[in-house]
Image: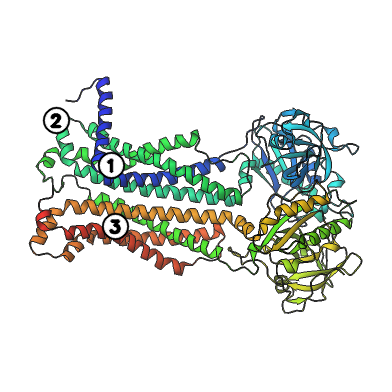
């Protein structure tokens, strides 16, 4: 009898652990298979849990506790296509709201920062203008110096900034005399009044905060006035009073917004509702959340396949131990002991597998993080670490997985009849019937594997199509960068803002190997982006701004056609005669012509903008039609005109200057080798100027832009491949075990005259039925899932005609091998040997 004392129970537990390890060593093949299966399943689950935990469930830590809400408009502003809030509206909300406890605001840029007391080149940093109460709102104390005071926005004083701890180390070498020093930010002097605590970078990966007085006329982007529609927009943050819900705050803000709309209908007549959302939820954005949770659920589907696989492996191992477990029972072991022994075996297997899963997760998280950082804003509080919370998840995962995988086999073993098992022929182990349950679990494995295989192949096909779309230009030969010449000249209309870049262009093009250089305004890599603006067509009357057509507008300079090999479809390119003293001109894209003037000759038509400081006032005459320079979109073309990037208007740089310039350089060979040369030439304009951080080729920028799609598609592909392999392994293990139990039967069949084909058919007959039913159900479910994913991933092309045959071939091949190998072994075993098998 087994001892009932506490000490003996503990010793019995460790004895059973040692016995479990001996069983693992006794069957190395099935043991390694089970460990690899669990390592794969747990590795995928741990990876996605760490991702969700570090991104979706993390938040910045502030000294002042409580939820911070982001507040923005539900509708987009008519003039700037933005949901952000005008500083003028912010002031009204701040003074009239009774349900908001306190508010603050910020707006962001990237700006070149130069320390005149050092010899280093200027460097670009993330930079925010913030309300004076910004740090007080967050409860933040300075590491050095102080935060902002109301007098910091006085017109008689220099602008003041607080710098991050990281910038303090980089620019000042941690010198405490930084406080009170002058720092050149965006070409203008700023006084440093404080250094933030280590680690503080709110609201994203920020390094500089400048005190700003909301509202002030100098925040207007229009030189002709301070009308409400011309004001820049800010991000508005708030803390609600105790007991106030976001919905109650939205209702109050809607009432205030209605009053603003009645008083200022020109700018606010469509701005009537506001979103009040926790900042971290707003920051993540729905697209990230949907993708992450979709992958999270798929990871648990892969884990479920792994657990089902391990279940069948443990069921097979337990069935082969029927006699041993029956003898234990006959000698006095109770059912709890039998169940505990089987569950302990599963616990050991899953624990070792989970250790492998942790190693897989550690590597996978590095891979995902490299993709993720390139495609999304890098919030300073985001992380993908195997921290205490993740390791706690691992412990729970091991326990749940071991129970799921081994509890049922243990219960079935404990409930089997001891006498019948001991009388049973040990060569067949029929006393522990596992067929129906194992095949049911196997059917689930095949269905789940089919679903993920379908999604996997489809996502990989979409990924391939996305990355092999033809380019109308040569993207690897064009370097894209930019710089901010703020402070150069009297204002943004000073001719030097054209003359200095063009002089730099001449110097660069004099280097052997540099083909051409050009500059752009409001463009990403010279071909994407543009500011979405309303305009007027000559001869058309508009009752209000809502009726005006809209397009994306970007400025370009001489040499643009050489950099991008842009051969106009009609008309001419800009030239040196297009100046502020000559006729105002523009070029439109072919997509613009097709959308607004289908079948008409656009040359000579005229359009105009109202009060845009970097575009000439009055009508612009269309002088050319630009061809398409970008690749076809992966997603469906949006019904929202603001999201159709190819409807463009190009204006000449010389007729509308801007301090922030994009720069594109085309060269023979790798254009990145010219970055140091460009830095030296830019420093000749002024040491306070620097290149933007994201200096890359057009191809690299495209990959960065598609990083989130590539990450999603790659992860779905890997999950599907893992599930398919696990499904095949599960089928192989069941077929191998079933074949092993029936070796004597096959020996008798062959001794009575059955040939190899009969034996093979006898082995795979039941497997074929399970495969057919499981895979059919999986394909139907996979097709349904991909239809749902098409909308959330905004994918235009779903090559289902290609995917179906590929998935069917993969399933037949992988599952056929899993069934065929045991069948082939059985058919090749001589009857004399088969009849001796124990």
Q: Is residue 520 above or below residue 488?
A: below
The mark that comes first in sequence, 3 or 1, is 1
Q: Earlier in the sequence, mark 2 or mark 1?
A: 2
| Circle 1 residue | 408
In the picture provided, is 166 more to the left or to the right than 397?
right
Q: CA distance from mark 2 to mark 1?
A: 23 Å
Residue at 77% in and 34% down? 133
Q: Nearer the viewer, residue 112 or 551?
A: 112
Q: Quadrant of residue 524?
A: bottom right
Task: Name the foreground residue: 557 vs 822.
Answer: 557
Tag nearer the camera, 3 or 2: 3
Left or right: 369, with 627 as reference point: left
- Seen in the picture, residue 413 relative to 618 is either above or below; the reply is above
Q: Earlier in the sequence, mark 3 or mark 2?
A: 2
Secondary structure of residue under mark 1: helix
Which residue carries the number 3 mark? 818
Q: Secondary structure beneath disc 3?
A: helix
Q: Residue furthest front?
A: 512
Task: Compare residues 262 and 111 and report the one nearer the observer.
Answer: 111
């Amino acid at each position: 009898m087994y001892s009932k004392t506490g000490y003996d129970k503990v010793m019995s537990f460790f004895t059973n652990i040692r016995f479990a390890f001996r069983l693992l060593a006794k069957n190395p093949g099935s043991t390694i298979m089970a460990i690899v299966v669990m390592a794969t399943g747990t590795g995928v689950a741990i990876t996605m849990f760490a991702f969700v935990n570090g991104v979706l469930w993390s938040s910045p830590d502030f000294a002042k506790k409580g939820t911070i809400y982001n507040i923005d408009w539900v509708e987009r502003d008519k003039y700037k296509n933005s949901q952000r809030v005008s500083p003028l509206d912010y002031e009204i909300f701040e003074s009239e709201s009774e349900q908001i406890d306190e508010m603050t605001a910020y707006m962001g840029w990237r700006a070149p920062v130069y320390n005149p007391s050092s010899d280093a080149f200027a460097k670009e940093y993330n930079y925010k203008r913030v309300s004076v109460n910004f740090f007080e709102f967050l409860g933040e104390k300075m590491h050095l110096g102080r935060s902002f005071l109301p007098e910091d926005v006085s017109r008689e004083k220099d602008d003041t900034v607080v710098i991050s701890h990281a910038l303090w180390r980089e620019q000042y070498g941690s010198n405490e005399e930084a406080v009170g020093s002058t720092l050149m930010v965006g070409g203008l002097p700023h006084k440093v009044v404080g250094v933030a605590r280590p680690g503080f970078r709110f609201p994203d990966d920020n390094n500089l905060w400048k005190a700003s007085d909301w509202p002030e006329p100098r925040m207007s982007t229009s030189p002709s006035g301070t009308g409400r529609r011309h004001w820049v927009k800010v991000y508005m943050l708030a803390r609600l009073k105790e007991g106030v819900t976001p919905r109650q705050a939205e209702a109050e803000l809607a009432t205030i917004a209605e009053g603003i709309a009645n008083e200022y209908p020109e700018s606010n007549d469509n701005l009537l509702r506001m979103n009040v959302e926790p900042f971290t939820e707003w920051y993540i954005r729905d697209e990230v959340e949907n993708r992450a949770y979709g992958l999270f659920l798929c990871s648990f589907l892969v884990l479920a396949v792994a657990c089902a696989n391990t279940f069948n492996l443990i069921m097979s191992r337990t069935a082969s131990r029927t006699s041993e477990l029956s003898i234990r029972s006959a000698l006095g072991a109770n059912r709890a002991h039998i169940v505990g022994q089987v569950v302990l075996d599963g616990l050991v297997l899953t624990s070792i597998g989970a250790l492998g899963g942790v190693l897989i997760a550690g590597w996978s998280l590095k891979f995902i993080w490299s993709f993720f950082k390139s495609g999304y804003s890098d919030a300073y509080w985001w992380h993908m670490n195997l921290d205490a919370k993740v390791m706690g998840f691992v412990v729970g995962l091991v326990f749940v997985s071991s129970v799921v995988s081994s509890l049922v086999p243990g219960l079935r073993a404990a409930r089997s009849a001891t006498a019948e098992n001991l009388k049973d022929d040990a060569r067949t182990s029929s006393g522990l019937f596992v067929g129906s349950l194992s095949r049911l679990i196997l059917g689930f494995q095949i269905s789940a594997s089919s679903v993920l295989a379908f999604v996997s192949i489809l996502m990989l096909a979409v990924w391939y199509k996305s990355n092999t779309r033809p380019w109308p230009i040569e993207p690897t030969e064009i370097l894209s960068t930019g710089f901010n010449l703020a402070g150069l000249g009297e204002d943004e209309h000073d001719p030097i803002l054209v003359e200095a870049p063009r002089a730099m262009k001449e110097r660069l093009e004099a280097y052997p190997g540099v083909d051409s250089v050009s500059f752009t305004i409001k463009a990403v890599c010279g071909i994407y982006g543009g500011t979405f603006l309303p305009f007027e067509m000559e001869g058309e009357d508009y009752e209000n701004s809502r009726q005006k057509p809209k397009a994306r507008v970007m400025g370009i300079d001489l040499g643009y056609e050489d950099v991008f090999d842009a051969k106009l479809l009609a008309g001419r390119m800009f030239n040196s005669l297009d100046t502020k003293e000559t006729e105002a001109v523009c070029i439109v894209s072919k997509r613009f012509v097709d959308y607004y003037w289908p079948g008409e000759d656009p040359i000579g038509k005229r359009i105009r903008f109202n009060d845009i400081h970097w575009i000439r006032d009055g009508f612009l005459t269309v002088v050319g039609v630009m061809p398409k320079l970008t690749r076809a979109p992966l997603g469906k073309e949006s019904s929202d005109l603001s999201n159709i990037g190819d409807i463009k208007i190009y204006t000449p740089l010389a007729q509308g200057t801007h301090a922030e310039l994009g720069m594109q350089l085309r060269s023979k060979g790798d254009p990145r080798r010219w970055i140091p040369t460009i830095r030296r030439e830019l420093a000749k304009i002024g040491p306070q100027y620097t290149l933007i951080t994201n200096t890359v080729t057009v191809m690299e920028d495209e990959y960065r832009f598609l990083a989130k799609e590539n990450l999603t598609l790659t992860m779905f592909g890997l999950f599907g491949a893992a599930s398919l392999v696990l499904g095949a392994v599960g089928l192989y293990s069941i077929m191998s075990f079933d074949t092993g139990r029936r070796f004597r039967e096959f020996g008798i069949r062959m001794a009575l005259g059955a040939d190899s084909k009969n034996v093979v058919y006898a082995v795979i007959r039941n497997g074929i039925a399970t495969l057919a039913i499981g895979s059919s159900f999986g394909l139907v479910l996979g097709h349904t899932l991909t239809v749902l994913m098409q909308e959330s991933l905004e994918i235009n092309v779903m090559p289902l005609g290609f995917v179906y045959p590929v998935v069917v071939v993969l399933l037949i091949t992988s599952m056929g091998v899993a069934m065929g190998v045991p069948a082939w072994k059985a058919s090749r075993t001589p009857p004399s040997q088969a009849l001796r098998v124990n």
